[in-house]
Image (cartoon, rainbow, N blue to C red):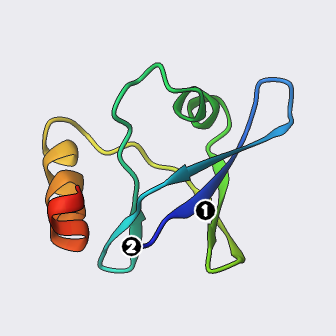
Amino acid sequence: REVVVLHTRTAAGDWRTTRVWVADDQGTPLIEVAEPERAFYQDLLEHPEVRLERSGVLHPYRVEVLPQPDGHRLIRAKLREKYGWAD
């Protein structure tokens, strides 16, 4: 199962790394935020430029939060499709 490393900027400007599952929708990586209090989510709200490390390669992205509740349903469906029972 693929686990990626999300690199976000903290309020102090330091890089924070968080291991997450990822699913793709038409070439766009999707990451679920289970709890809005998660530190990496707070980071990306303030600094939406992130790096996603896949197979040791860093890819730059600008985060876009999907509208709810449809965004959550899309991400959950894609994660279930990719990870199956592990999800």
The earlier-in-sequence mark between 1 and 2 is 2
Q: In whole angstroms, how far apart are the C-alphas of marks 1 and 2? A: 22 Å
Snapshot quadrant of residue 47: top right
Q: Amino acid at mark 1?
A: Tyr
Viewer-side residue, 14 vs 28: 14
Mark seen at residue 71: none
| Location of residue 87 in the rendering, given as x and y in whole percent from the top left corner | 23, 55
Q: Residues within 10 Å of mark 2 (few under 14, many from 20)?
A: few
Nearest the viewer among 54 and 72 is 54
Residue 15 horizontal/vertical position (percent): 81, 43
Residue extending farthest to the front is 86
Left/right placement of residue 76 relative to residue 50 reads left
Where 67 sits versus 54, above or below?
Answer: above
Tell me the residue at 19%/52% (across/down): 76
The residue pinned by badge 1 equals 61
Going by the image, does 16 lie left or right of 30?
right
Residue shown at the point (49%, 65%) measured from the top left: 3
Q: Amino acid at mark 2?
A: Arg
Mark 1: few, some, or many residues within 10 Å (few <14, many ≥20)?
Answer: few
Q: Splitting the image into 4 quarters, where does residue 6 fall?
A: bottom right
Q: Which mark is residue 1?
A: 2
Give the quadrant of the N terminus.
bottom left
The answer to whether the residue labelled 1 contacts the one labelled 2, judged by CB atoms less than 8 Å apart, is: no
